[in-house]
């Protein structure tokens, strides 16, 4: 593991293991294997704070998310949901119970695990090691790239539980796989294998083996991190705008308006052009965008 020279320290992350497997790369491992890496409400806010820190930390350029055990993430912690429902029923019967602050029983604006509806600046790659169900699949759909283990399985089973996939996954799955495949996944309970996820352009690729999943995802992250950090921030914004908006031209205008002048005035542009002229590898400086 590479230990970066962090300018700031990350927030407390009891749900997640943080490591630094390559220069400029942050590996976030969901660490609730006994619960299939399902996430209670507090863990979403924890991850939201972590990813905001990641966007601000100049020594980091790309993040990878994976899970421990057999699951990437099995979605929302339904045991917590059941316990909360029991508390509400007891309160309705007049019993004295302490119900958590309602403001804490919602997801942050950035969505499930702070990723599924995240705007952000820097790219995040999902290394899907196993079951990615419900909100776990929505985490993947909110990431910029996906590497799937041969053991990965994707699904949105919310309708089987009387819920719906409300963390941004429905819209994003339609954009990636099309309305017919998305409808079968969300309304008929179809699960997708790793190969099917790649076939339907949801995953970038399936790793050569389960054991090579994280190294392959880190290798992809290193390719991203080797490019100008300014260019990556602006390019990601442009791609996201094109995905989120209906107008191609409006998306292009928005990225130019937001970042065009700052990119051209930034130090990394000169570094890249000089390195090209001198046939040398560029030595990028942290992005100030």
Image: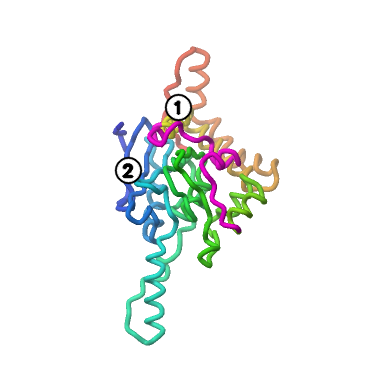
Tell me the residue that label 1 is attached to. Answer: 226
Front position among marks 1 and 2 = 2
Residue located farthest toward the bottom when viewing the structure as drawn: 94
- Figure colour scheme: rainbow
For the residue pair 82 and 184, the one nearer the viewer reads as: 184
At which x and y percent is residue 194? 51, 41
**At numbered mark 2, what does the secondary structure look like: helix, strand or loop?**
strand
At which x and y percent is residue 157? 52, 58
At which x and y percent is residue 78? 41, 64
* Alpha carbons under labels 1 and 2: distance apart: 21 Å
Residue at 37%, 38% in the rendered image: 26
For the residue pair 125 and 241, the one nearer the viewer reads as: 125
Residue at 52%, 35% in the rendered image: 205
Say whether residue 70 is magenta: no
Does the CB distance between marks 1 and 2 fall below 8 Å?
Answer: no
The crowd level at tag 1 (other Cα within 10 Å; few <14, some 14-19, many 20+) is some
The crowd level at tag 2 (other Cα within 10 Å; few <14, some 14-19, many 20+) is some
Above or below residue 157? Residue 223 is: above
- Residue span colored magenta: 188-215
Residue at 46%, 15% in the rendered image: 280
Q: Quadrant of residue 2?
A: top left
Instruction: Say whether disc 1 or disc 2 marks the residue closer to the N-terminus.
Output: 2
For the residue pair 215 and 286, the one nearer the viewer reads as: 215
Quadrant where the image shows the N terminus: top left
- Residue 18 image label: 2
């Amino acid at each position: 593991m590479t230990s970066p020279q962090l300018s700031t320290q990350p927030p407390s992350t009891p749900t997640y293991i943080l490591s630094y497997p390559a220069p400029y790369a942050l590996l976030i491992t969901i660490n609730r294997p006994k619960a299939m890496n399902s996430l209670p409400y507090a863990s979403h806010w924890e991850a939201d704070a972590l990813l905001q820190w990641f966007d601000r930390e100049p020594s980091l350029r790309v993040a990878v998310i994976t899970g421990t055990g057999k699951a990437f993430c099995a979605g929302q912690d339904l045991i917590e949901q059941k316990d909360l429902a029991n508390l509400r029923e007891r309160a309705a019967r007049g019993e004295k119970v302490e119900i958590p602050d309602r403001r804490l029983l919602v997801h942050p604006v950035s969505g499930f695990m702070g990723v599924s509806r995240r705007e952000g600046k820097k790219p995040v790659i999902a290394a899907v090691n196993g079951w990615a169900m419900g909100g776990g699949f929505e985490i993947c759909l909110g990431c910029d790239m996906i590497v799937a283990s041969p053991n990965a399985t994707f699904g949105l089973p919310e309708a089987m539980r009387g819920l719906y996939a409300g963390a941004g996954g429905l819209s994003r799955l339609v954009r990636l796989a099309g309305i017919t495949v998305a409808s079968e996944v969300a309304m008929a309970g179809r699960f997708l294998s790793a190969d099917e996820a790649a076939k339907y352009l949801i995953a970038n690729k399936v790793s050569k083996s389960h054991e090579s999943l994280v190294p392959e995802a880190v290798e992809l992250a290193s390719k991203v991190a080797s490019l100008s950090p300014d260019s990556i921030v602006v390019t990601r914004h442009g791609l996201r705008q094109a995905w989120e908006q209906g107008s191609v031209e409006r998306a292009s205008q928005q990225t130019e308006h937001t970042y065009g002048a700052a990119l051209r005035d930034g130090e990394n542009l000169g570094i890249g052009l000089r390195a090209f002229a001198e046939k040398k590898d560029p030595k990028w400086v942290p992005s100030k965008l």
